[in-house]
């Protein structure tokens, strides 16, 4: 996905609505399990909506429905409480060689380029 010259992102995002299970430790250090939702993806990560406050740098496990294996991801951005984006987190794969199979996700979730 080509990026625009004035955009800071390394990869273009695809808007989605994919239910996921998110597991990890919240900003208070408590373990959590959340039926969250990924709202956009790119080749190296995702933006997700969660009900838990997560700290930048924290590692979480993301599980897509069906047969996909759990993915280890790191929180690279977390929206501030009471902000417009409250509950949103930016995630990137912990393993630099990991990525989404975008073509498979397009077919399974009806993802389109916008």
Image (cartoon, rainbow, N blue to C red):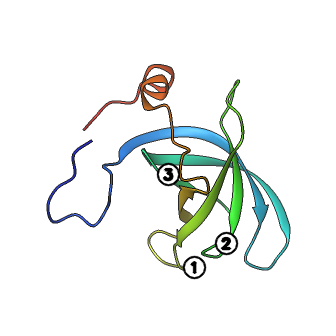
Q: Which residue occupies the extreme front position in the image?
A: 97
Q: Quadrant of residue 21?
A: top right
Residue count near mark 2 (Cα–Cα under 10 Å), binned few <14, some 14–19, many ≥20: some
Residue name at image x 63 percent, y 56 percent: 73
Q: Nearer the viewer, residue 81 or 6?
A: 6
The N terminus appears in which quarter of the rendering? top left
Kind of element beneath mark 2: loop
The answer to which of marks 1 and 2 sits earlier in the sequence is 2
Give the foreground label among 3 and 1. Answer: 3
User: Taking 65 as reference, is 49 left or right?
Assistant: left
Residue name at image x 59 percent, y 47 percent: 37
Q: Which mark is residue 97?
A: none
Residue count near mark 1 (Cα–Cα under 10 Å), binned few <14, some 14–19, many ≥20: few
Residue name at image x 48 percent, y 77 percent: 83
**In the rendered view, would you say 89 is above or below 81?**
above
User: Taking 25 as reference, is 43 left or right?
Assistant: left
Image x and y of residue 69, in percent: 71, 34
Residue count near mark 3 (Cα–Cα under 10 Å), binned few <14, some 14–19, many ≥20: many
**In the rendered view, would you say 68 is above or below 54?**
above
User: Taking 94 as reference, is 102 left or right?
Assistant: left
Q: Nearer the viewer, residue 71 or 87?
A: 71
**In the rendered view, would you say 22 is above or below 66?**
below
Look at mark 3 in the image and give the residue it sits on.
46
Image x and y of residue 59, in percent: 69, 63
Residue name at image x 54 percent, y 46 percent: 97
Kind of element beneath mark 1: loop
Residue 6 visible in this rendered orientation of the protein:
yes
Look at mark 2 in the image and give the residue it sits on.
53
Q: Which residue occupies the extreme top position in the image?
A: 107
Image x and y of residue 41, in percent: 44, 46
Image x and y of residue 77, in percent: 51, 71
Look at mark 1 in the image and give the residue it sits on.
81
């Amino acid at each position: 996905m080509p990026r625009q010259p004035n955009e800071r992102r390394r990869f273009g995002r695809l808007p989605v609505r994919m239910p996921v299970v998110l597991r990890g430790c919240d900003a208070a250090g408590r373990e959590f399990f959340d039926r969250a939702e990924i709202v956009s993806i790119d080749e190296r990560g995702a933006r997700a909506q969660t009900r838990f406050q997560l700290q930048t740098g924290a590692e979480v496990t993301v599980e897509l429905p069906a047969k996909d294996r759990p993915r280890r991801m790191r929180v690279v951005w977390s929206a501030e409480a009471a902000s417009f984006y409250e509950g949103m987190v930016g995630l990137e794969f912990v393993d630099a060689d990991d990525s989404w199979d975008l073509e498979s996700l397009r077919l399974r979730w009806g993802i389109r380029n916008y």
